Amino acid sequence: MKAESLFWQQCTQAVTDDGSIDAEHLMELVIATYRSHESDYEEIERSAEALLAENRELKSAFGLTTQALAEQRKLFEIVLNNLPLGLSVFDADQRLTLSNLRFCQLFGFSGDDVAPGATIADLKRKTRGSEQADARPRGRKEGQQAASKAGRRIRRREWLMDDGRIIQSVVTILADGSNIAIHADVTEDRRAAERITYLAHHDPLTGLPNRIRFREQLDAALAERGQDEQIALVHLNLDRFKSINNTLGVSAGDKILQQVAERIRASAGSENILARLGSDEFAILQTGRQQPWNITALADQIRRELSEPFFRGDKQVELSVSMGISIAPEDAVETDKLLRNAAVALSHAKADGRRRERFFTGEMDEKMQARHALEADLRAAVQNEEFELHYQPLYDLTQHRVCGFEALIRWNHPVRGRVSPMEFIPLAEEVGLVVDIGRWVLRRACNDAAQWPEDIKIAVNVSAIQFTSSDLPQDVGEALAAAGLSPSRLELEITESVLMENLDEALPILHALKERGIRISMDDFGTGYSSLSYLSSFPFDKIKIDKSFVNDIVDHKEAHAIMRAIILLGDALGMRVTVEGVESAEQMTLLEREACDEIQGYYISPPKPFGEVAQMLCMPPKKSDSVTPLAKIRR
Ligand code: C2E
Ligand code: CA
Ligand code: CA
């Protein structure tokens, strides 16, 4: 209240009834007013001081907060600019509000380019690269749906930079239209992924598509096949390639495989699909042609190309190829079946003497089914021990007595009856069952022989697979030990396939066996490709001349001359000679005259069960027509 109006009010209150002013009363009022104002003043003074103190406190707190904020901002900038990922934030007007150093590096922007306020359009223009059309990775949909529930959307973008780098951006668009994005250089990851995909689908040695890729290509070709269109599938396998690897070494084998791939590629041309299915297996897919003519012509050409010698340094290598062909839709319309049928046809090409092609036929399928059934039965036979050994005498021509027996396996099948070893041994070899069968034969033969007189030997056939897929010396050692049989009474008969397929592996095994006193015979001599060359690779104790050489020796001079030459050869090498398949007295007489050591054949006796061995040992000597001087003279 203004002073005048306050004083006016005090005067009014001091007016007496007669209209005069009571001076004393006025004085009191004025003093009272002064007093009350004095106390207010003190209060105001006190409040002002408190306010000042608070203000000071606030000021110091504000100073501290500003300092902390500055520090935090510094830390934020350090983190931001040292992030391995690029970061950008654009406001709702698509203007840059924040970015980091990595963002500039990734896109090659200068500091000026990324000044706050720069627009997306500006930056896009300055980017040295282009946005990829469809770089959205799988699973994007779910991510996007989940994000849109929270009012956000996530977009993936990919940039192919002019220098070849690939940059991926993940942009989170907020509800107000602003966005936060992180950017990464995915070049290395992408290259590694591409490499992995490539390696998973290609053969590193030849660069050809592998089995997985070929299946995909075949799947696609079959799916796209027109109604009248034919698709031919060739399954190629190099003949006896394993022996090349064994003799020349794996790296030389690899080089030759590369040359093979090159020749097949040249023959097949770019219009056919070519693949390497496995070590020495290839495949060709031909579409859009009339079959079987076109594929026959191609197969012919490949066979010719591969029959030209290969060179590895100064070494010349001869190769041949077998091929199985199946055609869609005639043979099958499904990938698996078409592949299987080509493989079946290939196995027939191999069985028919290799270096040829075979087209799949329904008959082959039946044979295949029969083979599968036989295989199943054979597996059961091993479990149920359905085998038996028969023994055929080996007859010593100088002593005119039985000097040993060859163990020959017999399979008595409950339904099939007696199955010939010629039928089931090759199958057992193929499926690896021959290892178990061979072990059983060794044990049984040694046990049986242990019951015979000391000077009677036992000959056991051993297949090539037993050399590579089992520990033969151990199996032999265990069989001898279990039977208590002297190693010198055991003869192992091997065919040249043992040496042909894996000479390096087989030789040390043969030497180890021989060192223990076990004898080694070369069986079926003369039936293979190069029996003579293998004869010099190992000091065999015996050669068994195949029965095919015996048939005509009595009536044909040439056959006789060959037989004589082989016997002389064995003699010269210090190897005992046994002639197999002797069926008549005349044959025996002639062989005796040629100083053959030993014979085996129906003339002496067919193979018989164990129970008849004693009887065979007691049989009277087989007399020849006359004891000829020729043999006596040469001995
Ligand atoms: P191989 O080792 O050459 O056995 C001789 C074969 O000729 C036997 O046939 C025998 O019965 C037959 N044979 C004997 N004398 C005569 C004859 O005077 N004339 C004619 N035409 N044939 C005669 P088998 O027992 O059928 O055996 C056939 C083949 O099966 C054997 O040929 C051998 O390679 C194989 N084999 C037999 N047993 C075994 C075995 O235990 N293990 C292995 N790995 N193979 C076996
Ligand atoms: Ca034999
Ligand atoms: Ca034989």
Image (tube, helix red, strand yellow):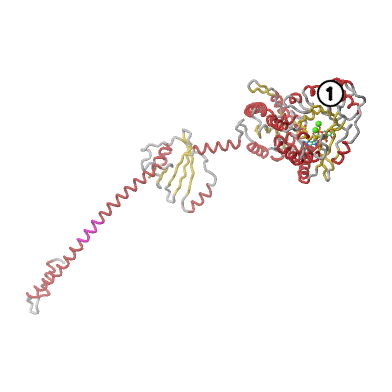
Q: Position of residue 184 (x, y in %)?
A: 46, 41
Q: Is residue 54 on the magenta stretch?
A: yes
Question: In front: 136, or 42?
Answer: 42
Categorize mark 1 by other alpha carbons within 10 Å: few (<14), some (14-19), many (20+).
Answer: many
* Stretch of the chain drawn in magenta: 48-57
Left or right of residue 90, residue 312 in this image = right
Q: Position of residue 433 (x, y in %)?
A: 74, 40
Q: Amino acid at mark 1?
A: Met
- Given the current orientation, which residue lies at the most extreme bottom position? 17
Q: Quadrant of residue 107?
A: top left
Left or right of residue 559, residue 253 in this image = left
On screen, 41 above or below 486? below
Mark 1 residue's CB less than 8 Å from ligand 1? no
Q: Position of residue 135 (x, y in %)?
A: 52, 41
Left or right of residue 603, residue 375 in this image = left
Dot 1: element: helix
Question: In front: 461, or 622?
Answer: 622
On screen, 383 above or below 394? below
Question: In front: 630, or 26?
Answer: 630
Q: Quadrant of residue 530?
A: top right
Which quarter of the image is occupied by the N terminus?
Answer: bottom left
Q: Is residue 368 on the magenta stretch?
A: no
Q: Which residue is mark 1?
A: 563
Which quarter of the image is occupied by the C terminus?
Answer: top right
Q: Main secondary structure of the magenta part?
A: helix
Residue at 50 percent of width and 49 percent of height: 144
Res. 236 in view: no
Res. 182 in view: yes
Q: Position of residue 20 (x, y in %)?
A: 6, 76
Q: Quadrant of residue 380?
A: top right
